[in-house]
Amino acid sequence: MPKTCENFMCLCTGEKGHGSQGKLLSYKGSSFHRIVKQFMIQGGDFTHGTGVGGESIFGGVFPDENFILKHDQKYLLSMANRGPNTNGSQFFITTAVCPHLDNSHVVFGHVIEGERYLDQIEAMAVDTDHKPFADIRVLDCGVVSGYGRDQSPVVKPIVVPEPTPAPLTLPIPTVLATVLATTPPVNAVAPTIPLLHDAALAQGEPVKEEKKKKKKKKKSSSDDSDSSSSGADSSESDDSDDD
């Protein structure tokens, strides 16, 4: 929007002299006459200071250039008007997203520094017509060094939020992981393993007590067979005595 930007910049510098109403074509000394919270801050009426005046550097008003840019964020600079093609000197700065203003107001810039001052202005007390009780004025204005006709376009840097760090996970040591993998569950039944003495374990032999138990068991079996044989004999001798 070269024409709209040229109008705003020249009204900041006052380089065009006086307008058709005999007023200096400059924002210096003008007021912010309307504040609507969560919407916008309006100013630029340097002829009346009430929102009914103002004048462009082209004399009177000038047409809308285009509606390419949208009111899709805070701190945008847009032209106030009385309807289509009635741009003068009044402007507003958005303090919220305003999609209902798209295609009817020309967005031509954005704030690159000092947003906190705009927040303070937005917080000022106002009457029922949204006129601030305090006198809020532009004490001075112009082109900041480094910006202007012969400078590169100003691009506001986009602040990329820091990514949320992932939870810190430490790898389990290999030895511990092996132990965890081989440890049986709590309710698991441990397998039965025969106990071996150290010496026998070294030779791969069973415990000597087991050998002794087997010998005793074998001897006990032989004793039982002998006693049953003797019992048979005694019964036979008793029969012979009866005879």
Image: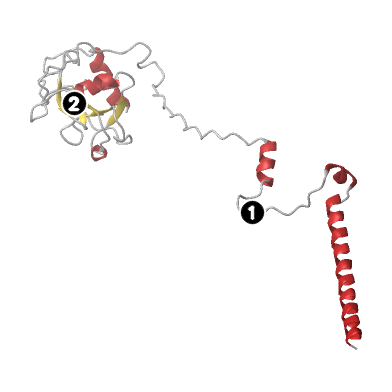
Q: Position of residue 135 (x, y in %)?
A: 12, 17
Q: Is residue 17 left or right of residue 65?
A: left
Sequence-wise first label, 1 or 2 = 2
Q: Is residue 224 left or right of residue 44?
A: right
- Report the front residue among 5 and 165: 165
Q: Residue at x 89, y 67 (%)?
A: 222
The amino acid type, in three-letter code, at marker 1 is Ala
Give the label on residue 219, or none: none
Q: Residue at x 65, y 43 (%)?
A: 180
Q: Is residue 107 left or right of residue 21?
A: right
- Report the front residue among 83 and 16: 83
Res 85 quadrant in image: top left
Q: Residues within 10 Å of mark 2 (few under 14, many from 20)?
A: many
Res 154 quadrant in image: top left
Q: Quadrant of the C terminus?
A: bottom right
Label 2 sits on residue: 42
Label 1 sits on residue: 188
Q: Which of labels 1 and 2 is toward the front?
A: 1
Q: Residue at x 16, y 15 (%)?
A: 137
Q: Is residue 89 visible?
A: no
Q: Helix, strand, or loop for circle 1?
A: loop
- Report the front residue among 94 and 117: 117
**With respect to residue 181, does 240 lie above or below?**
below
